[in-house]
Amino acid sequence: MNLRLTTICCCLALLLTSLSVSAQNKDVEKGKEKLKEAFQQKDPAKRQDIINKANELFQKSGLKNPQIKVIMGDAYLDHGDLKGAETQYNGVDKASKGEVYSKVAEAWVSQAMSDEKNEDKLLKNAVADYKKAGKDKEGATYIGDKLYEKGEKSYVKAVDYYFRGADTPSATKIARDYEKKGGTEGINQAFELYKRCALYKKAGDLAWESKQYAKAYDAYSTGEITEGMRKCADKFYSLGQESEAQNIFIKMVENYAKTANTEAIEKLAHENVSVMNYGFAARIYDKAGNLNAAKKYYGLYKFMNLDIDSAKMLLEGTDQASLIKAIDANMKNLAPLRDVKLQFDDWVKQQPPVSIEIDPETSQYKVSQKDEQMLIDYYKLIKDQISDQCQIISKNVNAVTNPELKKMLMKKFLDYPAVGKILDKQSFAVKLTRSSTQIKDVYLKKI
């Protein structure tokens, strides 16, 4: 009898609970209907009155305030009142913030994509809501994607948002689009973006392929891409830009020094010694901390520049004692050669400044067409004098008795293009006379 009574009581309790839940659900549904009705009203006061009644129904249903705020915020969102939605969502619980603020942020983005005039302002609102949602990076990427879909005119903004979201792959996607676009503009845009993405080798390779060697070096150097830097240095040497090439090698030495790669430093120094780039070899040894070698090769560099007193002073105490004696023994011929070099250097300084451009066929530097005549006019005045000076070089270099000194002198004077044109490069015998020498044969400065 007691068991039967207990069963009946339990059934009644379940029935009452079910009826209570049903009544609560009805109040929630009625409240939602009221909200729909409210947003159909044009009169703000009437709308707010109905919203208040909806809120009363939600409270009657037993919903907690954070739950009511979610429903209210969704209603404002559905109506397109995003500020109102934000206000309501301020009252939701912590667990719901990510979802509700993401929804309103996406709504801001949607509005922004169809309102170019107010795009920046609307996206700023979206960013703020993604931050409230705790989804700063995801939101930035979402905005970037939407801007990307608008096409190239929005690429710059898209890139900025991708970087806010630390989304390098998406930014790289735009760089590839620029690259496919081609042309100088497309290549340059792709280069800057690859570099910004820290894809330094890719940026450098792109600039290299488009023959923008300075930009290629800029990327390779920033990324410390040694093989790329070496490639650029060799190219600058081939273009006659010796100082630029040497600065690149010094940067490479600094990179090698960071990793204590003394073998690579020694190899680079030996390469330059073998071609008598003694001044640069001295710089390398100095950077590597080998001061004795730096002193020796700086002394040889000074001799090649016919700064004879400095050369002898620097070579003192090195293994070049016999060379110092040879210098003293050949002063009769070295003195006139020093005078020729001083004269050549003076003429180089007086040469009119000209614009340089790359020949698209040879990839070599050349004087721009508009400045060529200016150069011709200058050298026309000193053509015969240069020819006579080259004959002095021929006579005195060949009179030097020490083979090593002679070799260094020939290497140095061949830095003046005129010497290699008027004299035989191997024997330094006179090849062109005054009468057979043309104006373009007497240029003294490498282009």
Image (cartoon, rainbow, N blue to C red):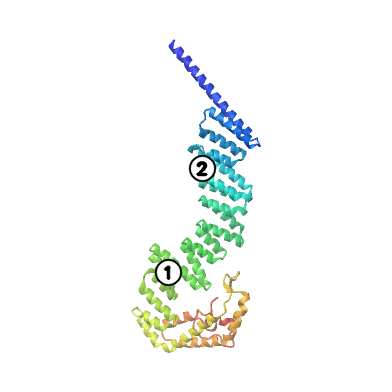
Neighbours of disc 1 within 10 Å: few (<14), some (14-19), many (20+): some
Residue 431: x, y in percent? 54, 85
Residue at the (45%, 68%) spot, across then down: 249
In the picture as drawn, the residue positioned furthest to the top comes out as 1
Residue at far left of view: 317
Kind of residue sitting beneath label 1: Leu
Q: Position of residue 8 (x, y in %)?
A: 48, 14
Q: Quadrant of residue 406?
A: bottom left
Residue 249 visible to an observer of this rendering: yes
Q: In the rendering, which numbered label is found on residue 28?
A: none
Q: Position of residue 144 (x, y in %)?
A: 56, 49
CA neighbours of label 2 inside 10 A, class few (<14), some (14 to 19), many (20+): many
Q: Which callout, 1 or 2, points to the residue nearer the camera?
A: 2
In which quadrant will I find the C terminus?
bottom right
**Disc 2 marks which residue?**
133
Instruction: Tell me whether the residue at label 1 lies in contact with that at label 2, contact meaning CB atoms closer than 8 angstroms.
Output: no
Mark sitting earlier along the chain (1/2): 2
Residue of label 1: 268
Q: Real-space Cα distance between discs 1 and 2?
A: 56 Å
Residue at the spot x=53%, y=45% of the render? 130
The answer to whether residue 167 of the structure is visible from this angle is no
Q: In what element is the residue under mark 1?
A: helix
Q: Considering only vertical position in the picture, is 64 above or below 9?
A: below
Where residue 18 appears, x then y in whole percent?
52, 22
